[in-house]
Image (cartoon, helix red, strand yellow):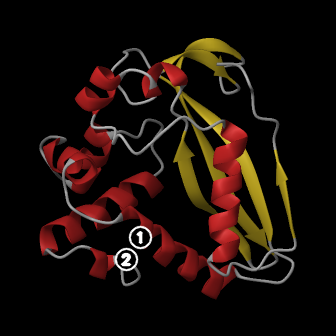
Amino acid sequence: MDTVGSRFSRPEPRRRVRDFVAGLLAPFPVKNCWTIAEHAGDTGPGGMQELIGRASWDDALVRADVRGFVAARLGHPDGMLLVDETGDLKKGTHTVGVQRQYSGTAGKIENCQLAVHLSYASPLGHTLLDVALYLPKSWTKDPARRAEAGVPDTIGFATKPQLARRLIETAVAGGLPCWWGAGDAMSRRR
């Protein structure tokens, strides 16, 4: 929190961020606003949902702070960037990016949300570094659905390899030392 705390102007969101990250790191099998809120001692998910959906903070600056933190503690000339696509199975259709699509997690076409993750590994350790949500064409071409879910008009369609490239370029431009990268094959199915 010393690294990103200044990005939150009020103490309430700083506390929520601290509790949210603690919940993400906690060893329970299902992590959502309900379970994270319960872990934090809240009676319901409203505060965590407020943090994610409506609190004012600049995620680009927080991500830059995290990259700086990782570079300072794990940065090494032999560092490696690792790219992987992950699918989260979903039951509904309202979660941003959800549609029936191939999920490597499920090993078949399922109703899911996909994201491209960037990790960093060096002789000093490893960590998740960044993530980009895959927004299928069915979402980018539906203004009403985008508006209802709060997806900004500025976000357009990008393939998963394009998302991976953006994550890598941002990490390298941010000064994270790395010698090479590796990745899992990312599905081109839509």
Q: Residue at x 38, y 63 (%)?
A: 59
User: With respect to residue 19, does 85 lie above or below?
Assistant: above
Q: Viewer-proximal residue, 188 or 67?
A: 188
**What residue occupies the far bottom of the structure in this picture?**
72
Q: Residue at x 75, y 27 (%)?
A: 187
Q: In this view, does 139 lie to the left or right of 109?
A: left
Label 1: how many Cα within 10 Å (few below 14, some 14–19, many 20+): some
User: With respect to residue 39, does 150 lie above or below?
Assistant: above
On the image, the x and y values in percent for residue 88 come to: 53, 29
Q: Viewer-proximal residue, 17 or 19?
A: 17
Q: Viewer-proximal residue, 166 or 106?
A: 166
User: With respect to residue 167, does 46 lie above or below?
Assistant: above
Say which amino acid is labelled 2.
Answer: Val
Q: In this view, does 30 lie to the left or right of 17?
A: right
Say which amino acid is labelled 1.
Answer: Val
Q: Quadrant of the N terminus?
A: bottom left
Is residue 112 at least partly visible in the picture?
yes
Labels 2 & 1 near each other (Cβ < 8 A): yes
* Callout 1 secondary element: helix
On the image, the x and y values in percent for residue 79 come to: 81, 74
Q: Which residue is drawn at 64% across and 56% down?
A: 166
Q: Residue 4 carries which label?
A: 2
